[in-house]
Amino acid sequence: MLVESNTENKEDKDASSEALEIIDVEETLPEEAPQIDHSQLYVWVADSGNDRIQKFDGNGKLLMSFGTSGKTRPPYLPGEFKTPSGVGVDTEGYIWVVDTGSHRIQKFDADGDFFLEFGGEGWGQDKFYMPEEIVVEPTGTILVADTSNHCVKRYDSDGEFVLSIGFAGNFDGFMKFPVGLALDREGNIYVADRDNQRIQIFNEDGQFLSKFGEYGFEEGRLNFPTGIAVRRDGTIMVAEKSQNRVQLFDREGHCLGVLGESGKRDGQFNVPCSVVEDPYGYVFVVDTLNQRIQKFDPDLNFLSKWGILGKEPGQLYNPCGIGLSWEPDWAPQEE
């Protein structure tokens, strides 16, 4: 259930009240909710503790998995993983994996067969240090959160370096352990700047535009933001792993509501690391220490969940990243 934020301009509320309005599910659901066939949506999960990528349909049915555990130290072989933390799928169906522990990016075809790799431990254009997230841009380029190098890097589809955004620090445009990445419909780049306790927004050329957030536990403040997604209406969703919630913000950083709380029940979280929205507005949250994926409808009412701790196919062990793909013509036409 979504808890909506009170704002000061609500005339029918006591201005001194800090109570939260609980949205009634029956009031928020449309009279005839459209039936979406989520069997044509594919949910890719970086099953970090099991060193593999698992592919589910949008209803939680396991379709395939690939990857094996790599050695404890280099060299790491193609197709092996060491705590993969991020996954994305491009328009040609290639799967991009952030292989965090081996400080590299690996690319696979739609069947999970190895295609290419680049990176390695270090600093500079072609090196990474504990990268954690990846997003694929509409042009086919990719953005990588090079987390412990405190920057975001762009590469082309062949893994060739294009540009770098940010340096270590807390000034505008600087970063301290960026872990989450998202794009809006205009191509602007959103960064969950974790240890600076803020969200930063850049244009598609990497120029700083704005920021919001400051450390705290209250609604509207941030406590180690990790995952981020931008909804089709422009609402920004931020997963806070230390606060066990997903907060919703507008572009100016005003809090619009809170999804979830600490716990194991449906709609509750234990270290939510990633969040993503599908083209119809359904939301998927990686609930890491509850070892599951949770699915919400466009009004953020809980729908379903899947996953349980384990190493067998379909089971999860500290999942981290999530990416979506779908069948041609499944998504609605862009307006």
Image: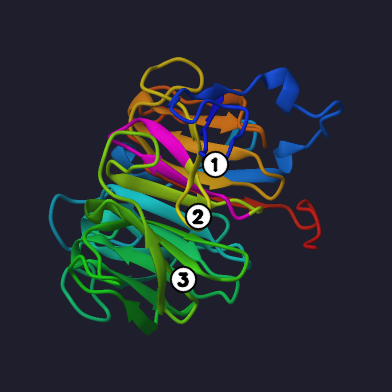
Q: Is residue 140 above or below residue 136?
A: below
> Dot 1 corresponds to which residue?
64
Of mark 1 and mark 2, the one earlier in the sequence is: 1
Q: Nearer the viewer, residue 252 or 144?
A: 252
Up/down of 275 relative to 142, above or below = above
Name the spot of residue 300 as percent of width and height, x first. 61, 32
> Which residue: 32% across, 28% down?
289
Three-letter amino acid code at disc 3? Ile
- Residue picked out by circle 2: 112
Mark 1 burial class by Cα count in 10 Å: few <14, some 14-19, many 20+:
some
Span shown in magenta: 234-247
Rendered image quadrant of residue 318: top left
Query: How far is the residue under mark 1 from the one under mark 3?
Result: 24 Å
Tell me if 52 is positioned left or right of 295 in this view.
Answer: left
Q: Around disc 2, counting alpha carbons within 10 Å, would you say few (fewer than 14), some (14 to 19), or many (20 or more)?
A: some
> Toward which corner of the image does residue 122 lie, by quadrant?
bottom left
Marks 2 and 1: in contact by CB < 8 Å? yes
Task: Mark 3 and mark 2 in contact? Answer it, CB < 8 Å.
Answer: no
Looking at the image, is mark 3 or mark 2 earlier in the sequence? 2
| Front position among marks 3 and 2 | 3
What type is the residue that disc 2 sits on? Gly
Q: Is residue 136 left or right of residue 312?
A: right
Q: Quadrant of the C terminus?
A: bottom right
Q: Earlier in the sequence, mark 1 or mark 3?
A: 1
